[in-house]
Amino acid sequence: MNLKHSIRALLLGGAMFAAVPQAQAESFVVRDIEVEGLERIAPGTVFTYLPLKVGDAFDERQSADVVRALFRTGFFDDVELRRRGDVLVVFVTERPAIADIRFSGNKDIPKDQLEEALKEVGITKGRVFNRSVLERLERELRQQYFARGKYNVKIDVEVEELPRNRVDIDITISEGKVAKIRKVTIVGNEDFDEDDLLDDFDSGIPSWWAIFSSRDEYSKQKLGGDLERLRSTYLDRGYAEFNIDSTQVAITPDKRDIYVTVNVDEGNQYRIRSIKLAGNALLPEDDLMALVDLEPGDVFARARVTNSITRITDRLGDAGYAFANVNAIPELDEESREVDLTLFIDPGKRVYVRRINFQGNYKTRDEVLRRELRQMEAGWYAASQINRSKIRLQRLPYIADVNVRTRRVPGTDDQVDLDISVVERLAGSFSIGAGYSQSEGLLFNIAVSEDNFMGSGKRVAINANTSSVNTIYNLSYTNPYHTIDGVSRGFNVFFRETDAEEANVTRYFANRWGGNINYGIPLTEYDYFRFSFGYEDTEIVLADTAAQELQDFIAAYGEEYAAYKVEASYTHDTRNRTVFADSGNLQRISAETAVPGSDVEYYKLGYNFRQFVPVWKDRLTFSVDAKVDYASEYGSTDAMPFFEHYFAGGSRSVRGYKDLSLGPRDSLGDPLGGTFRTVGSMELLFPPPMAPESRSTRMSLFVDAGQVYEDYDTFTADELRASYGVGFTWLSPVGPLTFSLAKAFNDQPEDDLETFQFTLGAAF
């Protein structure tokens, strides 16, 4: 309470009663209450806080209670009580309201984050302004910057009075520089070297080569994460009694340098003596014990205990026990330094899913998402099916992110609702423009594509693309759910002109047109079979200086070829995403043939393998990619058509070598391609350091190897070409852009090298 105003109100109250006869001053019955001086606050609000009402007896002794009650609301700067006959008149002066809070100079902390911090201490737009809160406001803002290591921050707060009893608060911030960590010391460690422990810290002295590192910038949150990693290091190695006794953060008087000291008590290392299950397991004990990631004699590791709990909980979740609880109860024997571990299981009630609700699908129809679900409404809760449903949703090309929340149904203990929130990504585009590609020169393009046509999940694309190498016109349509069981159907028609000489390969022109109908059949949750049949017409025109190999083929088979094509493929795909996957496996076996009756008869076989292995959280992924392709003529055709040869080299196969340059060459020295190709790559994938949270960019360190051979029996490992380098991929609005810097390390004098390469439209 404002003491000065309270005393004033009490004196006025006393004066009020002194001005009337003594009998009246002692007490009177309040026949009415009037409130004067209100501007924004409703009279009813004042009446709510008054400790008396009409009809009550009122005397001088109650004045203090009334004044205190109104001051306690925080709405008023001044309160006076007067009597007008039997009417009690309350005169108030309202405190101003905060009209706006303006920030300037803040760069490190966004405006909305600062506003949220002030809101937590009761300072926000529309609230009553009390000058006594200015100190609290400034203190809270300082704490926000101190937590980020900016101890030199200066904050200037000015209050601007406005009409209608309002104020604006202008906050000017000079953030200063982050205090630098000069040394981190761990005291009390005996079994582990300090340097090894500090290697896991995000706080510390950066390496000499890490020019742009922020490791030496102090942050309270970052140090908290480091201490938790330190704790995990010990607990995961059996030091069950490990404790961080204290942490001292010392700052120099100029507030620029910080020294951090962590005092630890390692304790002793413990090993597992016995493991048992307790509680109500429900499922066979042998099945659950098989999920335990520990055995007697192993080091007592917290991470492995946690993993065991997770596996048992997931197994119970698959059986419908959505809220199963598994607790690890260790009993330490300090003398023998052994642990008797008991996993106590409380499965709770078996529950089923009542409803599944979707949020965030502003364009995509509800049924398009619902058909991807493996957890059904009214079915028993199954954790693995829910997780698989999430993966299937986030594999859709028009869905960027998926979050699933399990919510109990109020009033029941055996029902839950699933709330699935999705973030849609741009699934369609219209583009018209020009560009440049290393392999194709100038590009002119007009394209309309939509992976989620009118929210139906169907894909429609029309494309016209011209360059110095290719002129392409294409129309395609795919319905991924032609049947309710997930059988897809689509068609594709195209016309393509190719100037192979412009692509720096053997010299000819090709005009192709045709179309096909394709189907896809899901065999299992991870296996898919696709087939298509269609027609393709190819016309070949040789350049004036065409190689003899091309002239011989044209002399034998003519210049135009009609082919009736059948294609089939089997795919096994466990990737968690189709774009920027970071776990799972992709294997594909494919076959293509120009069936008997075609002008030229041939077939192609291919195998593709790709494995993604998470290395560290969702930040580091190891990828292995391998491809083998083989083609051959058959029937009445004695030579494989040269326009169906395989090529290698470039950003889509072996980086560092010019596009399509590897493999056999014709009699003029131009790349001719071959009938057998093998290509492989190993990559370490990670988000760019300058945009670690970006979902549209990714970098890699890679090693590529591959070669094209005239035939499979000419294969020799000595002919393989290899390179290493760094790559960058950006999912730009005009399509995926891939850049690479590569160095060939077993190239030969006749090879065409290219260090920097880029591609518009990349494979994932």
Image (spheres, grey):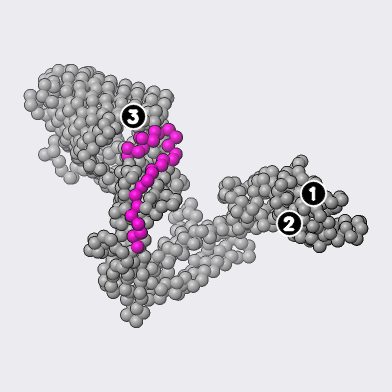
Residue 286 tag number: none
Question: How far apart, in angstroms, are the residues tagged by discs 1 and 3?
Answer: 74 Å
Q: Look at mark 3 in the image and give the residue it sits on.
A: 459
Bin the neighbour count of mark 2 within 10 Å (Cα to Cα): few under 14, some 14-19, many 20 and up. few
Q: Is residue 442 visible?
A: no
Task: Give the number of marks.
Answer: 3
The residue depicted at 44 percent of the width and 44 percent of the height is 694
Question: Which quadrant of the figure has residue 510?
Answer: top left
Q: Earlier in the sequence, mark 1 or mark 3?
A: 1
Local SS, label 1: strand
Mark 1 or 2, closer to the camera: 1
Quadrant in which the N terminus appears: bottom right
Mark 1 or 3, closer to the camera: 1
> In the image, residue 15 lies at what x, y percent?
89, 58
Is 50 in the magenta? no
The residue depicted at 13 percent of the width and 20 percent of the height is 599
Question: Which quadrant of the figure has residue 737?
Answer: top left
Residue 32 tag number: 1
137 or 404, which is in the foreground? 404
Q: Specify start and end residues of the magenta stretch as a single range.
A: 346-372
Residue 15 against residue 708 in the figure, above or below: below
Local SS, label 3: strand
Residue 51 tag number: 2
Residue type at tag 2: Pro
